[in-house]
C-alpha cells in the first residue's frame, strides 16, 4: 500500500471499527516491504518497467525470499508491480488508456465514498481543515510540490479511515496505489497545486455545510484534474 500515515489522533476521532487496517494492527514484514517498494516508486527510485530484484530486498530487509515473494503478491494485487513468469516482478508500466481508465474509476468511487461520510463529525472536519490549511500555507513556496503531494495523500487517508465500507476503501486504495505516481508528476505545476488546494477547501466547506452532493463534486473535480494532468505528462505536452 501507499504509505499514507494518519495523524496519531485519527483513531481517537473515528472512535470505532471504521479505520483502515494500518491503524488497527502492526504491519507484517511482507506489508512493510510492500510499502517500502511503493514509497520508492513514488520517490522516483523505481521507474515504470524497472525490475524489482528479490535478492536485493532480501538483503536489505534481512529476510528470506518467502516474505519478499508475499510482498510481491501484495504489490501485484494493488497494481504496483506485475509479475512476469521467468522474469520476476517489474514496476507497472501503464499506457495512457490504462491511466485514463483508472482515474475514471477512482473519480466515481471517491464521490461515492464522500457521500457516505455525510454528515461527518465536527472533529473529523477539524482534522481535514488542519491538513488543508497546511496545504494552503505551502503555496507560499512554489517548489514545495513534494510536500503538497504528501498532504494530499494524508487527506485521502483520513477520508478512507472515516468510511465504514471496507471493500470500497480497499478498491480505492488499490486505485490510489496505481495512479499516485502520475498524480505526483502533475503536482510539479504550481497552477495544479493551487487548483488542488482550492478543491480540498471546497470539500471542507461542503462537508461543514452538510451538503453531500457538493462535497462529492469537489473531490470528483480533484480526481478529474489529476487525470488530465497525468495525461498531459504522459503525452509530453
Image (cartoon, rainbow, N blue to C red):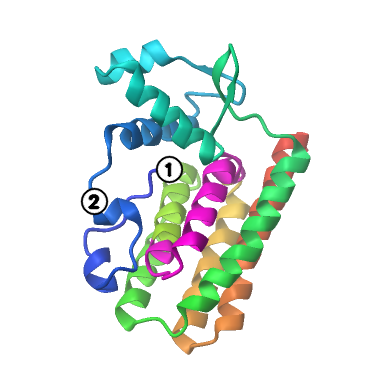
Residue 42 visible at all:
no
Q: Residues within 10 Å of mark 2 (few under 14, many from 20)?
A: few
Residue 231 visible at all:
yes
- Main SS type for the magenta part? helix
Q: Which residue is mark 2?
A: 25
| Identity of the residue drawn at 60% across and 81% down | 214
Q: Could you tell me residue 193's position as x and y percent?
A: 56, 54
| Identity of the residue drawn at 49% across and 52% down | 173
Viewer-proximal residue, 167 or 23? 167
From what the image shows, is residue 111 above or below residue 4? below
Q: Earlier in the sequence, mark 2 or mark 1?
A: 1
Query: CA gap, disc 2 to disc 1?
Result: 15 Å
| Identity of the residue drawn at 78% across and 36% down | 235
Q: Residues within 10 Å of mark 1 (few under 14, many from 20)?
A: many
From what the image shows, is residue 208 above or below residue 73? below
Q: Which residue is mark 1?
A: 1
Give the extent of the magenta segment. 158-186
From what the image shows, is residue 229 above or below residue 30? below
Residue 40 lies within the magenta run? no
Proximity of marks 2 and 1: CB atoms separated by less than 8 Å: no
Amino acid at each position: 500500500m501507499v504509505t499514507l500515515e494518519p495523524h496519531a489522533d485519527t483513531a481517537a476521532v473515528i472512535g470505532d471499527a471504521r479505520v483502515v487496517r494500518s491503524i488497527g494492527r502492526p504491519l507484517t514484514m511482507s506489508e512493510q516491504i510492500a510499502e517500502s517498494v511503493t514509497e520508492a516508486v513514488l520517490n522516483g527510485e523505481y521507474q515504470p518497467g524497472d525490475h524489482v530484484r528479490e535478492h536485493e530486498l532480501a538483503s536489505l530487509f534481512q529476510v528470506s525470499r518467502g516474505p519478499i515473494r508475499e510482498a510481491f503478491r501484495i504489490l501485484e494485487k494493488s497494481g504496483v508491480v506485475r509479475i512476469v513468469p521467468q522474469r520476476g516482478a517489474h514496476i507497472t508500466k501503464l499506457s495512457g488508456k490504462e491511466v485514463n481508465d483508472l482515474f475514471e474509476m477512482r473519480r466515481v468511487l471517491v464521490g461515492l465514498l464522500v457521500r457516505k461520510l455525510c454528515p461527518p463529525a465536527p472533529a473529523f472536519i477539524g482534522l481535514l481543515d488542519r491538513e488543508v490549511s497546511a496545504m494552503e500555507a505551502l503555496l507560499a513556496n512554489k517548489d514545495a510540490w513534494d510536500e503538497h503531494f504528501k498532504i494530499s495523500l494524508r487527506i485521502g487517508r483520513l477520508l478512507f479511515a472515516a468510511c465504514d465500507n471496507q471493500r470500497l476503501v480497499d478498491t480505492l486504495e488499490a486505485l490510489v496505489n496505481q495512479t499516485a505516481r502520475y498524480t505526483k508528476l502533475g503536482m510539479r505545476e504550481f497552477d495544479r497545486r493551487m487548483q488542488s488546494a482550492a478543491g480540498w477547501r471546497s470539500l471542507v466547506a461542503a462537508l461543514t455545510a452538510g451538503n453531500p452532493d457538493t462535497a462529492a463534486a469537489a473531490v470528483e473535480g480533484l480526481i478529474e484534474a489529476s487525470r488530465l494532468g497525468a495525461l498531459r505528462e504522459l503525452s509530453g505536452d
